[in-house]
Image (cartoon, grey):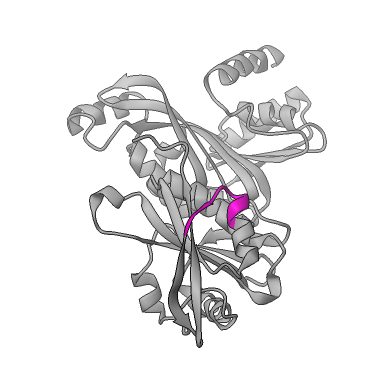
Amino acid sequence: MKEILMAKDEIVDRYSSLARAALSGETVLDLGSGGGIDVLLSARRVGPHGKAYGLDASVDMLELARRHAEQAGATNVEFLHGTIEDVPLSDRSVDVVVSNCVINLSDDKAAVLAEAFRVLRPGGRFGVSDVVTADEAAADSGRREAVEGRIGCSAGTLSVAGYQELLGRAGFVGIRITLTADHGEGVHSAIIQAAKPAIGPGMEIRPMRDSDAEQVLAIYQAGLDSGHASFETVAPSWEGFVTGRLPHLRYVAADTETGEVVGWVAASTVSPRPVYAGVVEHSVYVHPGCQAQGIGRALLTAFIAAGEDAGVWTIQSGIFPENAASLALHQALGFRAVGTRERVGCHRGTWRDVLLVERRSTVIAC
């Protein structure tokens, strides 16, 4: 058994991020754990104060994995019976989700990624090996299906762009997909890495939902009532809100106990012209009773990462100079003032200046 583990260590360390995904004391979940070898590697990584879960739908595989764990003397492992589309663990219960070429076998990959996001704690990491196609038209579909069949992808593969889209829709940020082995006809093995946005204890950042409408608009109105957030004085209807904002760059911060939304961030396009495709204007609002707790910073950090995943190269906004807290937050996260529009509008009987700020991506190439 030790020889098997040593050989597996060498393979994983050389070709994937699986063995390096976890840290001492953390909790790891392996989706589709099979005979349990990756679970045992993770258990070794996290040590006696951590834990490694293996999840598999096959009773026979679970029995084999448990025998391997007993032979290896591993006491910090647990093997669960279930599907990767419906993980039998509670919300925010693991630090790392790994998988070794299993997600491509699912007929509902969106559900798999949504479940991975759900069980991860804020700041948790997703690091899997899988099979992808370089693009939607990488090769003749018949020949590509033959390659997929040869390497065991019975449910078909996602394209790189499709994988990125589903990860982003689930709420992941910092998405990286690295192609490795080329199997022909545009089909590749790949390492897929992403993270759940980080935020302080008792909070979670997730994509905005229609069910958040009332709370989002209430926070919006509270910000407008402060007199230092916008020239607007009344929050729009929900229909007006979603119509004017990009669907894939809207997030909320929510209390994990009550589900209460305590802040949000969203973006709109600045122009329909193609040259401005990667330029957005954003807004970030935090409930008045929850300010100065790092929520705005966490939301904006997640938004910046998601924007870069989506190809955004410039984020811009206008801030009243009197809103010192917002200005300091933006400057701390890499925004710079590019100018001031003096007396641009009369707001509540007073002419107001607007400070224009922007943040340019340093990772997106032309």
Residue 233 in percent (x, y) is at 48, 84
Q: Is residue 136 left or right of residue 73?
A: left
Between 138 and 156, the one lying in front of the other is 138
Q: Residue at x 67, y 61 (%)?
A: 203
Q: Is residue 91 left or right of residue 182?
A: right
> Do we see residue 287 in this rendering?
yes
Residue 152 in percent (x, y) is at 37, 28
Between 203 and 359, the one lying in front of the other is 359
- Answer whether residue 182 is magenta in the image: no
Q: Residue at x 68, y 51 (%)?
A: 93
Between 233 and 177, the one lying in front of the other is 233
The residue stretch that appears in magenta: 330-339
Q: Is residue 184 above or below residue 284?
A: above
Looking at this view, name the residue that lies furthest to the bottom.
Answer: 349
Between 66 and 199, the one lying in front of the other is 199
Q: Is residue 242 above or below residue 24?
A: below
Q: Is residue 158 above or below residue 339?
A: above
Q: Is residue 26 above or below residue 101?
A: below
- Residue 103 lies in quadrant: top left
Residue 59 in percent (x, y) is at 57, 39
Residue 114 in percent (x, y) is at 49, 53
> Do we see residue 159 in this rendering?
no
Quarter of the figure with the N terminus: top right
